[in-house]
Image (spheres, rainbow, N blue to C red):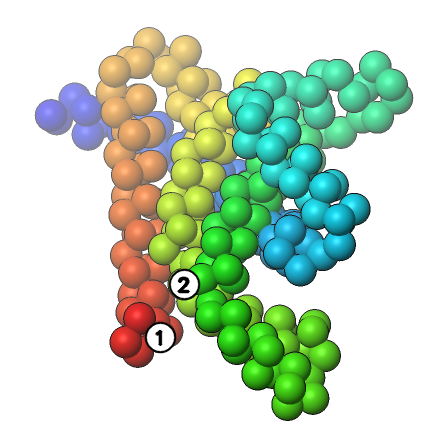
Amino acid sequence: MNHFIFIFIQALPFLLKGLEFTLELAFISIIVGFGIGMFTAIERVYGGKLAYGFSTAYVEIIRGTPLLVQLFIIYFSLPQIGIHFSPLVASVISFSLNSGAYQAEYIRGAMQSVEKGQMKAAISMGMTKWQAIRLVIMPQALRKVLPSWTNEFVYLVKYTSLAYLVGVPELMAQGEFVASRNFEFMDVFLGVALIYLMVILTITWAFSFVEKRIKIPGV
């Protein structure tokens, strides 16, 4: 135990530097993915046939292929047709697109769980369809989707470890950097796992607190 603590303290500055990239990737990707997911969900529920077709194709393609393949296509394949991204930008794009597809399904399910009569009632009161979606449907749907959104954020934090494969110096990459120099692979990666665990538990607690604060009474 003393040996682990000694190695962990030595590695901690590097691991914390990597954690900054990990959290940056996760926060940016979850926010951009939320915007993509919101737009896609609305198009799938209330859009026309063309919008529904494109949004459904996007969701099915992204959910049907591995995240690592998507990352490699964006970082390694697109340069062959003249489109170049830095490792960090390529990672954000791939994580955001992937998260957006899953969030779209979470939001779509939450929107469809709101009673259809509420849409009709809002329109009968003089609201347009988009006003009803924004002011009546979405406030309820977003409260219902929070548990799923929490899980998505947790998964995304862990998925950011894939970014080290394209050169982003996130937490996993920093762990690899330290371990390859002191050869203390067991202790270093146990330290990496401990940091991931602490971050995940903190995120889970924070979202659980928010969920209790904004839950719909009786639901």
**117 displayed left or right of 197:** right
Q: Amino acid at mark 1?
A: Ile
Q: Is residue 120 above or below residue 190?
A: below
The residue that mark 1 highlights is 216
**Residue 24 seen:** no
Residue 35 drawn at (x, y percent): 64, 55
Q: Residue at x 26, y 34 (%)?
A: 194
User: CA gap, disc 2 to disc 1?
Assistant: 8 Å
* Disc 2 and disc 1 in contact, CB within 8 angstroms: yes
Q: Quadrant of residue 158?
A: top left
Residue 88 drawn at (x, y percent): 64, 33
**Residue 127 seen:** yes
Q: Earlier in the sequence, mark 2 or mark 1?
A: 2
Q: Residue at x 71, y 56 (%)?
A: 47
**Which quarter of the image is occupied by the N terminus?**
top left
Residue 192 drawn at (x, y percent): 33, 29
Per the rendering, the mark at residue 144 is: 2
- Residue nearer the viewer, 17 or 30: 30
Query: How would you rate the neighbour count of disc 1 (Cα within 10 Å): few for under 14, some for 14-19, many for 20 or more?
Result: few
**3 displayed left or right of 24:** left
Q: Residue at x 29, y 30 (%)?
A: 193
Mark 1 residue element: loop
**33 displayed left or right of 145:** right
Per the rendering, the mark at residue 85 is: none
Q: Amino acid at mark 2?
A: Lys
Residue 143 drawn at (x, y percent): 42, 67
